[in-house]
Amino acid sequence: NPLQGAQFVLAAHRINQLPADQGAEVAFAGRSNAGKSSALNALTGHKGLARTSKTPGRTQQMVAFSLPSLAQGEGQPPLQVRLIDLPGYGYAKVPPELRDHWKQEIDAYLHQRRSLRGVVLIADIRHPLKEFDRMMLEFCFQTHLPCHLLLTKADKLSRNQASQALAAMRKQFEQDGLQATVQVFSSTEATGVESAREAVVALLRQ
Ligand code: GTP
Ligand code: MG
């Protein structure tokens, strides 16, 4: 597993509290309760790394993890490589001030973070994309930031239903002229974990 050995670095309430903006990082974004933290744990192979919860709105900070195993390129200076768990978006019970705060911080992060190499967008395979997901896809497309969509919780569907959902999503991307890549995923059953790891490594290495 190329993403093994991930370590918690810090949790930030503002982007200026994040680790120095050097090296390469990939951000995990998605609506509250979509399964971002679970996906991070599945990809790093470290169950308790990012906190997960049945209650939406669990991750209320930007949480940075380092990937020392990817940091050493042969004959190259050591690179800092990070994964960032972004706060979930769109949970109704979060106080409006906090929601506005995160809207601003996520927006600033996406616009300003120079080490950001790409976004892994996490969405529940059972539901159509919501406004936040569309905004994120559109933003990535406009700013030439690569985006890889994980249609997660695929274990809740039959294989057939899951591939139909994937095909429908690809068709929609084509119609909308979006460049994002998309795959089926499940954190609980480890579906699509290998290809998602490859996608993350590709984002970090470009
Ligand atoms: P916030 O931090 O609140 O934004 O949520 P999150 O996107 O980090 O979601 P989290 O990983 O905490 O998962 C939310 C809930 O969905 C938990 O109850 C998880 O166990 C469940 N879940 C996550 N991934 C999967 C999956 O692939 N399959 C199933 N069946 N449940 C999942
Ligand atoms: Mg979370």
Image: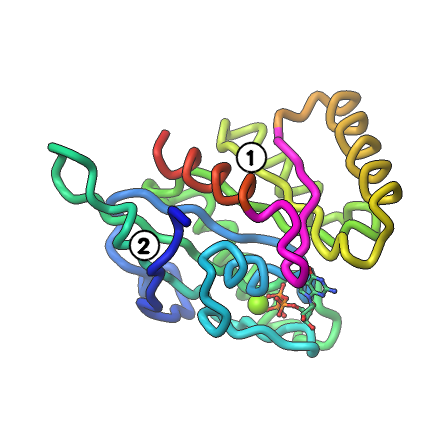
Closest to the observer, 187 or 10: 187
* Quadrant where the image shows the C terminus: top left
Closest to the observer, 120 or 14: 120
User: Judging from the image, what secondary structure is the residue with disc 1 in?
Assistant: helix
Q: Which mark is residue 67?
A: 2
The image position of residue 79, as x and y in percent, is: 21, 44
For the residue marked with disc 1, what is the amino acid?
A: Cys
Question: Which residue is denoted by mark 1 in the rendering?
Answer: 140
Residue drawn where x is 41% and y is 49% of the image: 1
Q: Is residue 182 magenta?
A: yes
Q: In terms of sequence position, does the residue under pointer 1 or pointer 2 come before the other?
A: 2
The image position of residue 102, as x and y in percent, is: 54, 63
Residue bounds of the magenta highlight: 180-193
Binning the other alpha carbons within 10 Å of mark 2 as few (below 14), some (14 to 19) or many (20 upward) gives many
Residue drawn where x is 57% and y is 53% of the image: 29
The image position of residue 178, as x and y in percent, is: 67, 26
Q: Is residue 93 magenta?
A: no
For the residue marked with disc 2, what is the amino acid?
A: Leu
